[in-house]
Image (cartoon, helix red, strand yellow):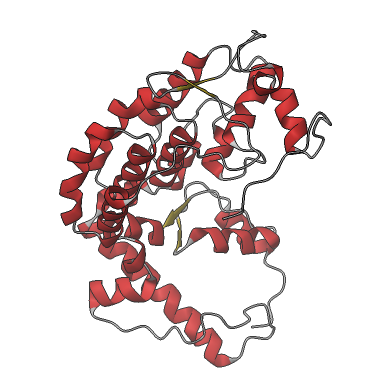
Amino acid sequence: MRLRDLSPMAAVVGNPEISILLHGAGADLRVMAERELFVVHYFDLEAASRSIFGQHESSLAAMLLRAFQVRLDKSLQRTDWTRRPLPPAMVAYAARDAEMTLALYYWLFEYFPWALNLHDSANLQTPVASWIEPFLRGISPVPPDVAIAEAIEQGVILSRQQVVNDCRNALTTLIYPMQRSRLLRLIADLALTQLTPDIEPLLQARTSDERAAAIRALIRLDAEHSKEKIYPLLQDPVHDVRKAASTALRSNVQKDITGPGLATPAKSADGSRSWTVGETGDAGGADDNDWKARLRSMMGEEPSRQPRTDPDQQ
């Protein structure tokens, strides 16, 4: 294949009425974007398969074996596909992959239409609070506590209750499983124990990613009463969920989840954490409550009042 000008394809992949089928969309979308091809509407069949059967059963080879008892040759998967021209063997390999991806789509459409519907890329556009969105996309440049502090300074967040409400609303409205899983991790990072009752029903979610993410979030939130609801998931049909349940129930989860050198919100008696909005002079001292001081500390501009010994790195 000697074709270098891919611009004729732009009208196809840029048409929202045309569904592009991908298996492992992340890498494919990046490669296509590098060539000025921006996919508007797609289905990620790998993500849909993962939601049904788990991460270790979602590869194209595993799914074709499950659906059609076909063994797919993946020997050229890690070959340099940027070379030109592609040799005939690689062209045949790519054509076979495309053919089988389409066959897998029809199989999923017949037997698991709900999974395809959830992984429609249109569901990625669900609006959420502006400070939450970077975490759903996996592109936040700062940890959650710092993002909260910045949002407070900008007036985006006005109270601790707003943080809880924003996360609760997102948990209600988000559809795409990957985004919901990332939201659960954010809730655990912020130690929003108030949302434990909202998370517990997700232990029975239809997708395995959400069930596993709910387990991890509840254990990190130290929801002791949730353990009883996690035990049945030791018998979950999906390995990822069973592993998450087993690990969670055996682990002694640490409460300090932000890591060395990162700001930690104040902890209340009920286990929840809070952020100071427009208040100063708390008992913890100015440096502990002033987010700007914590940011300076994180960037290496620590006060000279005394040296600090960093804990051992994990």
* Residue at point 20%, 58% (across, down): 111
Query: Split into 4 quadrants, where in the image is the C terminus?
Result: bottom right
Q: From what the image shows, is residue 193 above or below residue 143?
A: above
* Residue at point 24%, 76% (across, down): 68
Q: Which of 178 and 223 lies nearest the eye of the viewer?
A: 223
Q: Which of 131 and 176 lies nearest the eye of the viewer?
A: 131
Q: From what the image shows, is residue 286 above or below residue 19?
A: above
Q: Looking at this view, name the residue that lies furthest to the front.
A: 306
* Residue at point 58%, 83% (across, down): 79
Total numbered labels:
0
Query: Split into 4 quadrants, where in the image is the N terminus?
Result: bottom right
Residue 297: x %, y % from top left: 75, 34
Residue 105: x %, y % from top left: 33, 63
Residue 52: x %, y % from top left: 27, 56
Q: Looking at this view, name the residue that lies furthest to the bottom.
A: 88
Q: Is residue 111 left or right of residue 176?
A: left
Q: Which of 150 and 256 lies nearest the eye of the viewer?
A: 256
Q: Which of 175 and 156 lies nearest the eye of the viewer?
A: 156
Query: Which quadrant would residue 261 be assigned to in this image?
Result: top right
Q: From what the image shows, is residue 142 above or below residue 163?
A: below
Residue 107: x %, y % from top left: 26, 64
Q: Is residue 135 left or right of residue 98?
A: right
